[in-house]
Image (spheres, grey):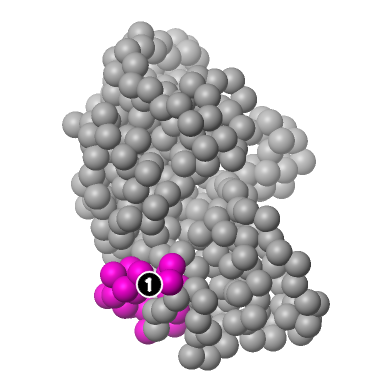
Amino acid sequence: MRAVQIDKPGSLELVERERPKPGPGQVLVQVHACGVCRTDVHLLDGELQIPSPPIVPGHQIVGTVLEHGPGGGETELYPAGARIGIPWLGWTCGRCRYCLSGRENLCDRARFTGMDIDGGFAQLTLADERYCFALPEDYPDLQVAPLLCAGLIGYRALRMAGESERIGLYGFGASAHIIAQVARYQGRRVFAFTRPGDDAGQRFARELGAEWAGSSLQDPPEQLDAAIIFAPAGELLTLALRSLAKGGVVVCAGIHMSDIPSFPYEILWGERSVRSVANLTRADASEFLALAPRVPVRTTVRTYALEQALRALEDIRAGALNGAAVLELG
């Protein structure tokens, strides 16, 4: 089979690999589409360490079950031919204090698709069946792929914003363009922040329901109750804090962020708070995938062939697209 793998930081290679064989509890999946995430950029750039390279990245996988590993029998969750989604969370121990308290996203032994486990930049992939999901039928493969990380992580971040009415989204990329729709469905007011000069991105945000869109260097027209930072730029945290009303929260939604500069205590005072999002739980996925068709969330995607994976990653790094990037494998 053909696959794209990261051999070392900065090295992305198209290779031929042997057909993988599913073990107990695993499914072999033919990949139809795989969303490309900024986390994949961080892995390629060495900002996140790959435990055992080489690794096939990609953790927004849409595909069809081809076969099961031995010993499944009546415990099999998805029959051959079922369309499923494979997200970032690929395995947890199920026994630690985090797993037992409904916080499996914090499991110290967790394994993640596309970083610890070969992912979806390939024609075939393996997955633990317990960490896969049935997908809403109304979504074609290309449109549903971004829901599996951009949507799931964005949804978890939105939940951490509490009942906030005025929400600022810093970095209007794949996650923000999904979560803006969810926030508007919930009756919230959305304020979008893009890179300075990104007029196209600001127009895109307004088309998706943002009542105001401007540069991240600008102040919003009124104070925010919450801000979600999707861009990996640490300096945005201080800008977001300065835009918050008292009692507001800044949620950092990325898995990696550049260093946060020092800031005066006065912009945190007033019971403002800062928190981060770490991964997702299976409960998050079940809840969001049921909600998305009700909104309904509509994803904007730019498609790439498997051989164009590097171009897709470079476009994300440069902020050169509106919406999400998706590899189409057919």
Crowd around label 1: few <14 · some 14–19 · many ≥20 (10 Å)? few
Coordinates of residue 137 in the picture (x, y in percent): 24, 48
Q: Residue furthest bottom?
A: 222
Residue 284, image x and y in percent? 51, 52
Residue at x 50% of width, y 15% of height = 24
Q: Position of residue 86 (x, y in %)?
A: 41, 36
Position of residue 174 relative to residue 101, above or below, is below
Quadrant of the rendered image containing residue 312? top left
The structure residue drawn at horizontal position 46% and vertical position 39%, both measured from the top left corner, is 40
Q: Say whether residue 299 is visible.
A: no
Image point (50%, 68%), residue name: 170
Q: For the magenta stretch, what is the residue range?
A: 185-211
Residue type at tag 1: Gly
Please tell me which residue lies in front, 166 or 169: 169
Question: 22 or 239, which lies in front?
Answer: 239
Image point (45%, 26%), residue name:
11
For residue 88, above or below residue 169: above
In the picture, which quadrant includes the C terminus? top left
As drawn, is 293 to the left or to the right of 259?
A: left
Q: Which residue is mark 1?
A: 197
Q: Is residue 189 magenta?
A: yes
